Amino acid sequence: MVKLFPLLFFVSISFGFEKDQEAPCNGKKIQKLAKQEAPCNGKKIQKLAKQGLRSLRISAIPSYLVELKNCKDKAKVKTIKHSANEKQLEDDANSAKTFVGKTSTFAYCVMALILYMAFA
Amino acid sequence: MNHRLQSLTPFIFWFVLLSSSLFAQPKLSFHLGGGFYSPTLGMLDPDSNNVIPSLSAFSKNMLIDWGIKYQFYPNARIGYARSNSYHSGKVGDSGFLRTISYRMLTFETFYYPRKRMELNFMLAPMYNKGTVKLTAESSSGDWDTLLGSYGNSSVKLSTPSEMTKRWFGLASMIGFRYYIFSWLAVDGKAGFIQNSYSEKKWEWGKIKIDGPTMDIKKSPVFNIHLVLGW
């Protein structure tokens, strides 16, 4: 029995360590926080952050809105919305920044017609 | 079999249109707003025709606009837009409603001089429609007799009738759009609408008649729209 004592002591310490190591990672507060943050990093939100607002199909918008609603961190929701909007505005501005070829010819035709109408 | 296919065609069309909108990534935008123009509504205003009910500035100069546009190229959109002008009142005991619909097939190119700011140029062939409608309330002796035989007292019947006219036109406009968000913008446009209107050959039922002598051959127009788009 006395010989088993060190063994029992070792086992209890090793289990104790295991509990002490895991406790901070799986604590109730951390689990609650992780639960709150998970919807804030949902697939739709991540896609939007990378590719802008219009990267989502119209059919995918409701699930994006649900992800936003489930994200309890209101400041983060605001940031997500703002960054997605800014990213889309930048993309739109870049894609239609140059005005050459047929589209510019069309614009010149419209301007010429309006000038003709104004002064004729 | 052929009849069945014909009846299914509209259903297939709307299904394809709706499903492609939902599952593809269309760059669709809708606009709603108003416009201002100053036509000469000869014989459609009380100054030139004492039969016509009084005309407010809203009925004479204001347009109610709506439309839908599809961006098919980074710099270009195509769409359908309508600008409507309404005038209602009473002629004798009858309700009077005059509608002029400027219906446009719009082609628009645009570019962004700066972020959030867009300059756009629009040409739109138009197929317009004018309607004058009178809704007269009259009692019909024959109906009175028939309905009276079932125990009904005198019944007022409503007999709607209208005269219509269609004509071609062309709209050319330059606009400035400011994006509040990437999905919401305010758009202002200025330009001209040209109309090939003639007072001849209005249709009243199947009869051709003369209509009002409106002077809308060349009209400057100013529009302001709220644009919602994805």
Image (cartoon, rainbow, N blue to C red):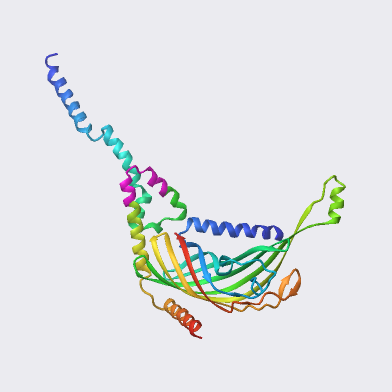
Viewed as shown, does residue B30 lie left or right of A8?
right
Pick whichever, A65 or B14, lies toward us: A65
Pick whichever, B175 or A108, lies toward us: B175
Which quarter shows the C terminus of chain B? bottom left
A50, above or below A93, in the image: above
B2, above or below A75, in the image: below
B78 part of magenta stretch: no
Viewed as shown, does residue A74 lie left or right of B3?
left
Q: Which residue is drawn at 16% across and 20% down?
A: A8
Which quarter shows the N terminus of chain B? bottom right
The percent position of residue A108, horizontal first and vertical second, equals 44, 80
Q: Which residue is drawn at 68% across and 58% down?
A: B7
Pick whichever, B179 or B211, lies toward us: B211
B136, above or below B209, in the image: above
Q: Give the range drawn in magenta.
A: A64-79
Viewed as shown, does residue B127 lie left or right of A82?
right
Q: Residue at x 12, y 20 (%)?
A: A6
